[in-house]
Amino acid sequence: MTIAPDERPDLEAPRDEASTQRRGADLFEEIEGARGAVRHELDAEIALELRDLSVFYGHFMALDSVSFDVPKQEVTALIGPSGCGKSTLLRCFNRMNDLIPTARMEGSIMFDGQDLLGPAVDSVGIRRRIGMVFQKPNPFPKSIFANVAFGPKINGYKGDMPALVEESLRRAALWDEVKDDLDKSALALSGGQQQRLCIARAIAVQPEIILMDEPASALDPVATLKIEDLMRELAEDYTIIVVTHNMQQAARVSSYTAFLLAGEERTGRLVEFGPTQEIFTNPTDRRTEDYITGRYG
């Protein structure tokens, strides 16, 4: 739902809970009816446990004391205005922030009984189990086959590589489009195909969690819908965490949603986390209501 700036209501206007529920429900039900039911079981197993996670870049605190559980084999959306720390949070899950010299993390992220922020953690090993797909497709300047086979090859995979490449491309809904051109340069693919190739490349190393940082923001509507369909299908076998600025996309693809917001000091904090339907139709925090109804952000 988008409200033109000159039509946005006063932020100090009295809260109308019934109206908020109608607006959120209208958005959620419209999308749910068009795209299929969104699962949001409350008793899901836990893939990641965040406790008091804070991130610093030098003396600047980018995230402050974020705590919530990421459900296993579901799509969890991270939403909020630009600059609230969504991508910073996403990069914590596979220690990508380690590549920034000034970055420092406090708190804990428990994954399979291990604290991902612990000093003894093998960050390279973690990235094999927690893959990432970036906002802009970044295929290697190699063939389609070589792109998908790259990760398994450097990790010492000894199995049937052609079979693994085919299975990964099938899981990424790309096999039928490229099966006769596997020696073709990946750079010759369309933007949407390149992004699905990057997803296939991530799948090929058999991760448990796939992180997606605005994976469809640079794509046209048709390619975007293919990526969204793919996310829902992959959640049958993988835990998906996606950063998105698109409220409709969050409602379409996710079972759970985390809303982050930064104050005047630009430090991001978790405002609310819960099943997506509840976040959109009955938020517990006024700031969540303001954001999902387009009053700001």
Image (spheres, grey):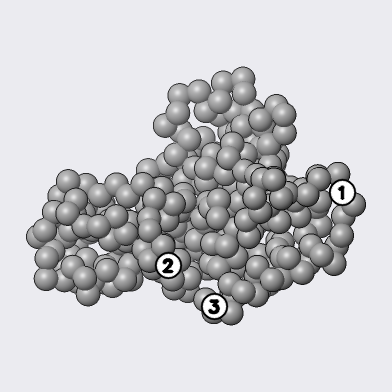
* Residue 24 visible: yes
Q: Which mark is residue 34?
A: 3
- Crowding at label 1, few (<14), some or many (≥20) Cα neighbours within 10 Å? few
Tell me the number on the disc at residue 42.
Answer: none
Q: Relative to 163, is 79 above or below?
A: above
**Labels 2, 1: front one:** 1
- The residues bearing labels 2 and 3 have C-alpha atoms spaced at a distance of 12 Å
Q: What element carries label 1?
A: loop
Mark 3 or mark 1, whichever is nearer to me: 1
User: Label 3: few (<14), some or many (≥20) within 10 Å?
Assistant: few
Please state which of residues 30 and 4 is positioned toward the viewer in this rendering. Answer: 4
Amino acid type of the residue that numbered disc 2 sits on in the rendered structure: Leu
- Measured as percent of width and height from the top left, residue 178 is found at 18, 68
Q: Which of marks 2 and 3 is nearer the N terminus?
A: 3
Q: What element carries label 2?
A: helix
Q: Residue at x 81, y 45 (%)?
A: 10
Query: Which quadrant does the C terminus fall into?
Result: top right
User: In the rendered image, which residue does mark 2 sit on?
Assistant: 225
Of residues 158 and 4, which is closer to you in this image? 4
Q: Is residue 36 above or below residue 44?
A: below
